[in-house]
Image (cartoon, rainbow, N blue to C red):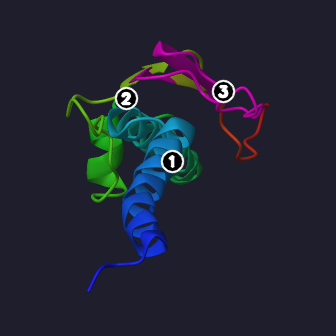
Amino acid sequence: MNNPPHRRWIALSVPLLVAAAITYGLFLAGPPSEQRKIMLDRKRVAEIGNIEQAIDLYHARVGNLPETLTLLREKLQPQLSIDDPETGRPYFYERTGKNTYRICADFSAASDAENLNRWTHDSGRHCFAFRIKTNTPGE
């Protein structure tokens, strides 16, 4: 028995359509290596946000900024991630005033142009400046 021509056409076209769909998906989302960079940058931003909250809590309890992120983790939140998820090195932390500080990280890519919130960053080293959110006397 011979297969009708339309079955042969379907058998040939289905793999081509699947390959085209995969190619289009990679085009839209970018290659896996780029997606990994984006995921790592999102994790960095989330961890810096968690550090900010922990510093606010530390300040509310102790009355000043922690000297180091390691001290913050030891005294307040042992599970707090203070290390870059890719390199394993600690985020850069610096007190810039009595109630101000900055945290820096090395980002793999620039944040989305649509991302116009406080976490906007370019690729490479970027520092975020913070001010304690708790109400303290004399501020």
Q: Where's the C terminus, which quadrant?
A: top right
Of residues 25 and 115, the one nearer the viewer is: 25
Q: Quadrant of residue 106?
A: top left
For badge 2, the amino acid type reads Glu
Mark 1, residue position? 25
Outermost front residue = 1
Outermost bottom residue = 1
Would you say 96 lies left or right of 80 here?
right
Q: Secondary structure at mark 2?
A: loop
Residue 47 is covered by the magenta coloring: no
Q: CA distance from mark 3 to mark 2?
A: 26 Å
Q: Where's the N terminus, which quadrant?
A: bottom left
Q: Position of residue 58 (x, y in %)?
A: 49, 49
Mark 2, residue position? 67
Q: Position of residue 83 (x, y in %)?
A: 28, 37
Q: Residue at x 38, y 60 (%)?
A: 12
Q: CA distance from mark 3 to mark 1?
A: 26 Å
Q: Which residues are magenta?
A: 103-130
Mark 3, residue position? 120
Q: Residue at x 56, y 50 (%)?
A: 53
Q: CA distance from mark 2 to mark 1?
A: 47 Å
Q: Quadrant of residue 10?
A: bottom left
